[in-house]
Image (cartoon, rainbow, N blue to C red):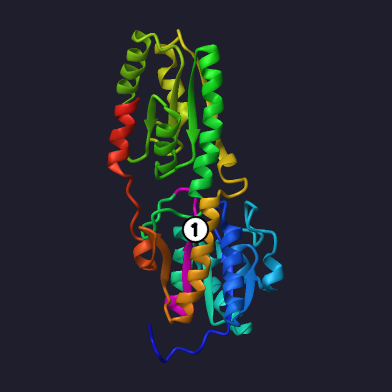
Amino acid sequence: MSEDLVKVKTIAVLTSGGDSPGMNAAVRAVVRAAAQSEINVYGVKHGYYGLIHDEFVEMDTHSVSNIIQRGGTILKSARSEEFRTEEGRKKAADNLKKYNIDALVAIGGDGTFTGANLLSKEHGVNAVGVPATIDNDIIGTDETIGYDSALNTALEAIDKIRDTADAHERMFLVEVMGRDTGFIALETSIASGAEIALLPEELTNVEEVKRQLNNMLKEQRRSSLVVVAEGDETGGAIKLAEKIKDDFSQYDMRVCILGHIQRGGAPTARDRVLASRLGAAAVKVLIEGHSEVMVGVVNNSLKLTPMRVAISKKKELDHSLIELAKILR
């Protein structure tokens, strides 16, 4: 923090990367917290693409009315290959200067923070990150915005699949999101009573999976549920089914991929509160003179993490939960 920093008069806010429930609540909090401090706000449409192509819109408290309960993001999101170049980032920085913007609030995941960090390093843009990703894989916060909502969406779907699995004595392989991390797969497997959970963080032994399923057959458990993270080394639920189906012809085996349903829908109360806290905190820390940091909540207290740290490390799964899942299956 520096006492020499110019007073923050105007900020920009954008959402980038995969959408997650609660992004709108975070945007709302940024705009309204800024208004309380008499700071002007511009929303940037389509993330870093809009930053380059001048998609700035003035926002006030009325702009964010009736959005806290909405999924997705009113500011939209898009990928930008141009922003990966020095020339593209210079265009983005020039547009920020064009609107006399003092600071940027970037809502998203590690890719979003990487972009904001580069703008700070290369062009002196004051930037604060707000973690929003259903994967929950960012360190410096107990949960990311959207994770709780995605978890509950996946669980609701899996509970319904369980009913059908039991009624028809079927085996279901259910694939959930999690290309690099297994937070959704692990917690939904525990909460749904799944027999097996396959995670990117653990090597998958297909023969061990077969052994566990054989044990279920011996116990006369005719229906079963296997939760597979999309990033599991077997290649996901479809590939796993191909590898084991010949050994379990006695099972009526089905594959269900939940896919993008996990991203949509209204955010849970927990995500709305978290997003509101972090959005307001982002404005507060900018006023205090912080930059190149991410705001998070750890043990119910606000925590600042340098962006370079947030993008350089991945949050680890709680190994006690992995052991719990194995005990309860």
Look at label 1 and name its amino acid: Leu
Residue 311 magenta-highlighted: no
Count of all numbered marks drawn on residues in the image: 1
Above or below: residue 219 compared with residue 132 = above
Residue 127 magenta-highlighted: yes
Above or below: residue 317 compared with residue 281 = above
For the residue labelled by badge 1, is the local secondary structure a helix, a strand or a loop? Answer: helix
Q: Residue furthest bottom?
A: 4
Q: Is residue 188 left or right of residue 213?
A: right
Q: Where does residue 221 sit, x and y in percent of width and height?
A: 41, 12
Q: Where does residue 49 sit, x and y in percent of width and height?
A: 61, 65
Q: Quadrant of residue 42?
A: bottom right
Residue at the image point whose x is 40% and y is 36% from the top: 232
Q: Where does residue 58 sit, x and y in percent of width and height?
A: 69, 75
Q: Where does residue 150 sit, x and y in percent of width and height?
A: 52, 44
Above or below: residue 264 compared with residue 173 = below
**Camera-side residue: 122 or 268?**
268
Residue at the image point whose x is 51% and y is 74% from the top: 283
Quarter of the image with the C terminus in it: top left
Q: Which residue is mark 1?
A: 274
Residue 235 visible somewhere in the drawing? no
Residue at the image point whose x is 46% and y is 22% from the top: 241
Quarter of the image with the N terminus in it: bottom left
Stretch of the chain drawn in magenta: 120-135
Q: Quadrant of residue 321?
A: top left
Q: Quadrant of residue 83?
A: bottom right
Label 1 crowd bin: few (<14), some (14–19), many (20+), radius 10 Å: many
Above or below: residue 229 compared with residue 2 = above
Residue 213 visible somewhere in the drawing? yes
Residue at the image point whose x is 40% and y is 51% from the top: 137
